[in-house]
Image (cartoon, helix red, strand yellow):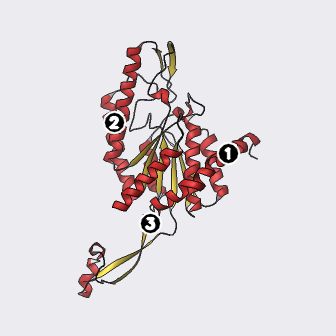
């Protein structure tokens, strides 16, 4: 039996996200993602006005006059949530931790999907695959997904995005919408964790290149979206005097005098460069990204992201 306090927390998330889904995001989700998955239906003779790019040249050569391939929109899609449950997700300097915000974003996307009769699956990963829930439909299934995102206790604290993407490609043969919800800290695209003060640029470059290959491969088969979850203290340290930081993923402990403005500035510069490096990798893999923060409402940012994708889809 699920403890009452866990059920209460899940219900609170459902209530908070349901209005946003009902009034705004479900329709945007439908317009952005529906129609991207297409199934082959039949071959028929070419008619004036048909798209030339649809011509089936093999059949045309055999029949001596043009035929085109006809496709129909998939009636249902699969939303495969990939959620980072590594140690850095427990951090939170605001009212909620990154893990709690992750659960809300997963809830919004999952409820938007089932309103469109799509399936929802879940991959929880650290530096290994922690849990896999195959795609299914229905509210009860989504509530289980939210529970796992919020309360699952990983067996390992690190992050390995490459390994998670390899697993995705093995278990998801058909095209899916794949939001990767992560802080992207400590992963192969980013070796500098939130409170680490000594990044190794050569290592970052080599690991970023390794992930770039996997990200491109995953995005060719699926619609991958990077959902970046951040806390403001990961970019700008507060002036609180001497503090001891422990890296949640490696256990590395460092002492830092946050009262020194030069050190705070150097920290902010390093974090900004790391984020720019991550963004470069995502752009190179042609992956859309959205950056959400624990100290800011996420509804407006999600809506803006969907609207931007919709405009680009209509232009294309």
Q: CA distance from mark 3 to mark 2?
A: 32 Å
Q: CA distance from mark 2 to mark 1?
A: 35 Å
Camera-side mark, 3 or 2:
3
The quadrant of the picture occupied by the C terminus is: bottom left
Disc 2 packing (10 Å; few <14; some 14–19; many ≥20): some
Residue 236 visible in the snapshot: yes
Pointer 3 residue = 35
SS for callout 2: helix
Q: Earlier in the sequence, mark 2 or mark 1?
A: 1
Residue 131 visible in the snapshot: no
Q: Earlier in the sequence, mark 3 or mark 2?
A: 3
Pointer 2 residue = 277
Q: Residue at x 49, y 20 (%)?
A: 238
Pointer 1 residue = 10
SS for callout 3: loop
Where's residue 77, x and y in %?
50, 63
Asked if disc 3 and disc 2 are in contact, CB closer than 8 Å, the reply is: no
- Horizontal placement of 164 versus 266: left or right? right
Asked if disc 2 and disc 1 are in contact, CB closer than 8 Å, the reply is: no
**Figure quadrant of residue 205:** top left
Where's residue 6, x and y in %?
71, 42
Where's residue 166, x and y in %?
43, 50
Q: Residue at x 46, y 22 (%)?
A: 237
Disc 1 packing (10 Å; few <14; some 14–19; many ≥20): many
**Figure quadrant of residue 272:** top left
């Amino acid at each position: 039996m699920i403890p009452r306090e866990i059920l209460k927390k899940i219900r609170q998330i459902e209530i908070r996200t349901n209005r946003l889904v009902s009034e705004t995001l479900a329709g945007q989700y439908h317009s952005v993602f529906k129609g991207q998955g297409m199934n082959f239906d039949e071959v028929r003779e070419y008619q004036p006005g048909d798209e030339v790019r649809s011509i089936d040249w093999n059949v045309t050569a055999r029949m001596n006059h043009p035929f085109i391939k006809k496709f129909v929109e998939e009636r249902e899609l699969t939303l495969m949530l990939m959620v980072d449950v590594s140690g850095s997700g427990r951090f939170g300097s605001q009212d909620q931790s990154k893990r709690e915000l992750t659960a809300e974003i997963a809830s919004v996307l999952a409820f938007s999907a089932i309103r469109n009769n799509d399936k929802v699956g879940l991959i929880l990963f650290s530096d290994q695959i922690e849990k896999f829930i195959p795609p299914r439909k229905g509210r009860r299934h989504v509530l289980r997904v939210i529970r796992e995102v919020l309360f699952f206790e990983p067996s390992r604290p690190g992050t390995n995005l490459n390994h998670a993407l390899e697993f995705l490609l093995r278990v998801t043969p058909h095209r899916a919408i794949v939001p990767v919800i992560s802080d992207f800290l400590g992963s192969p695209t980013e070796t500098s964790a939130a409170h680490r003060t000594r990044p190794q640029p050569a290592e970052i470059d080599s690991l970023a290149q390794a992930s770039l290959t996997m990200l491109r491969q995953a995005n060719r088969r699926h619609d991958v979206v990077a959902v970046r979850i951040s806390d403001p203290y990961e970019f700008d340290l507060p002036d609180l005097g001497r503090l001891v930081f422990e890296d949640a993923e490696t256990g590395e402990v460092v002492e830092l005098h946050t009262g020194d403005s030069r050190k705070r500035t150097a920290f902010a510069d390093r974090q900004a460069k790391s984020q720019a490096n991550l963004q470069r990798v995502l752009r190179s893999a042609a992956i859309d990204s959205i950056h959400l923060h624990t100290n800011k409402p996420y509804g407006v940012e999600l809506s803006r992201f969907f609207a931007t994708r919709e405009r680009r889809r209509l232009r294309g």
